[in-house]
Image (cartoon, rainbow, N blue to C red):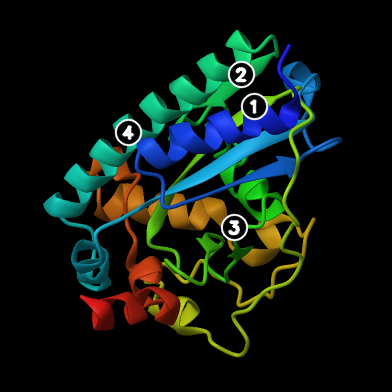
Amino acid sequence: MNQPSQISAQLEAILERGGAALWGFADIEGLTRRHLTEYSHAVSFALAMDPAIMASLIDGPNEPYAELYAAANVRINALSAEVEAALIGAGHAAWAVPASIRSDPGNIRGDFPHKTAATRAGLGWIGQHAQLVTFSLGPWLRLGTVLTDCLLPVDSPVERSFCGKCDACVEACPAGALHGSEWTPGLEREKIFAPAVCDEWKKTHYMAFHGGHNCGICTAACPFGQKLLKNM
């Protein structure tokens, strides 16, 4: 069996070849539940989204974003499957978390939050809009996650918010679903925003875009994303 350091180098090559903009390895011991408790580590990666399309969401979801969102999900699932296969091929257990599946629709949750793996892998922090924010891409990205029992060499987790006093996303949210709370690790999602309020708004106003799963107005308002437009 290959050493974890050798496996991590193999995974990094896969992610770079697959077009990931950011990636890292996380210790998630004790953060998984039910059928996922065998997994102690995670591979987290991000795909960059088109800045012009992301900026256009300030006026609400649109067809270009819906198409970009769907295409990103396909890319994430394919790349996650490749990472999963590499880990299994190296003799480890692994499971690719689906890109955008609500396994618990009642509570508006998936099996494991991509954002948790991303913060633990050092990619970024959780903004006041309850999305991952990074210095290089802002929140204009999509995340992929593969859980594993491989003891990968982990990155330092991000354990504080860098949003400062900015509340642009809170002001922009048409549903009034954001509470303006500063994230810290372990803070309950509901302390940051009201998932049911957000979900109901999207389903009421934006059903044409992936069955009411898309909005993005708060994402478009983020200054960390807006700065990308200056580099285009």
Q: Between disc 2 and disc 1, whose residue precedes? A: 1
Q: Secondary structure at mark 1?
A: helix
**Mark 1, residue position:** 7
Residue 79 percent location from the top left of the image:
41, 29
Measure the C-alpha gap from mark 2 to mark 3. 21 Å
Residue 187 sits in quarter: bottom right
**On residue 24, which mark appears?**
none
Residue drawn at the location 45% of the way across and 31% of the way down = 14
Measure the C-alpha gap from mark 3 to mark 1. 20 Å
Q: Amino acid at mark 3?
A: Leu
Q: Amino acid at mark 1?
A: Ile
Which residue is outermost to the left?
63
Residue 112 percent location from the top left of the image:
64, 34
Between label 1 and label 4, give the one nearer the viewer: 1
Residue 1 sits in quarter: top right
Q: Between disc 1 and disc 4, whose residue precedes? A: 1
**Mark 3, residue position:** 123
Residue drawn at the location 23% of the way across and 58% of the way down = 61
Measure the C-alpha gap from mark 1 to mark 4. 22 Å
Q: Secondary structure at mark 3?
A: loop
Q: Within 10 Å of the Cα at label 3, are there few (<14), some (14-19), or many (20+) other Cα atoms?
A: many
Q: Amino acid at mark 2?
A: Leu
Q: Between disc 4 and disc 3, whose residue precedes? A: 4
**On residue 87, which mark appears?**
2
Q: Within 10 Å of the Cα at label 4, are there few (<14), some (14-19), or many (20+) other Cα atoms?
A: some
